[in-house]
Image (cartoon, grey):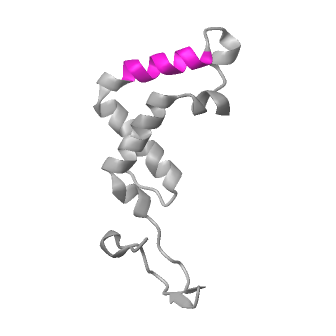
């Protein structure tokens, strides 16, 4: 899998990969976007923030991709030692999912 240091790019690439691998979802997602965008040529060329907010199936698909590939959410590394609330996060530190305390 192509990975990027940018989380948004990694999620977008993984979502496109999963969509290509699971073509059975393509028709539903396409129909949802066509319904939200309308049929005239002006609205079909511009996806608005409001339209994306109403794209329930697309949102569910992307959330499922993120949950199935949870490593996408843990691609951060401290590039410098960083003081935080009386502690110092050392340079090179990264989240360890088994040790996270929330």
* Image side of residue 66 versus residue 9, left or right: left
Chief secondary structure of the magenta span?
helix
Q: Which residue is drawn at 41% across and 63% down?
A: 74
Of 70 and 11, nearer the camera is 70
Residue 1 visible from this viewpoint = no
- 36 in relation to 62, above or below: above
Of 32 and 18, nearer the camera is 32
Instruction: Residue at the far front: name it.
Output: 102
Q: Residue at x 56, y 83 (%)?
A: 80
Residue 62 in percent (x, y) is at: 43, 40
- 27 in relation to 62, above or below: above
Magenta region includes residue 32: yes
* Image side of residue 49 versus residue 25, left or right: right
* Image side of residue 22 versus residue 61, left or right: left
Which region of the structure is painted magenta?
Answer: 26-37
Q: Residue at x 33, y 76 (%)?
A: 99
């Amino acid at each position: 899998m192509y990975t990027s240091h940018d989380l948004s790019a990694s999620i977008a690439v993984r979502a496109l990969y999963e969509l290509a691998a699971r073509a059975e979802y393509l028709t539903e997602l396409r129909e949802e976007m066509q319904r939200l965008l309308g049929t005239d040529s002006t609205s079909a060329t511009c996806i608005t923030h409001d339209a994306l907010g109403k794209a329930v199936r697309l949102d569910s698909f992307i959330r499922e991709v993120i949950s199935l590939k949870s490593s996408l959410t843990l691609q951060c590394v401290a590039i410098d030692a960083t003081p935080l609330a009386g502690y110092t996060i050392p340079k090179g530190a990264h989240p360890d999912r088994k040790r996270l305390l929330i």
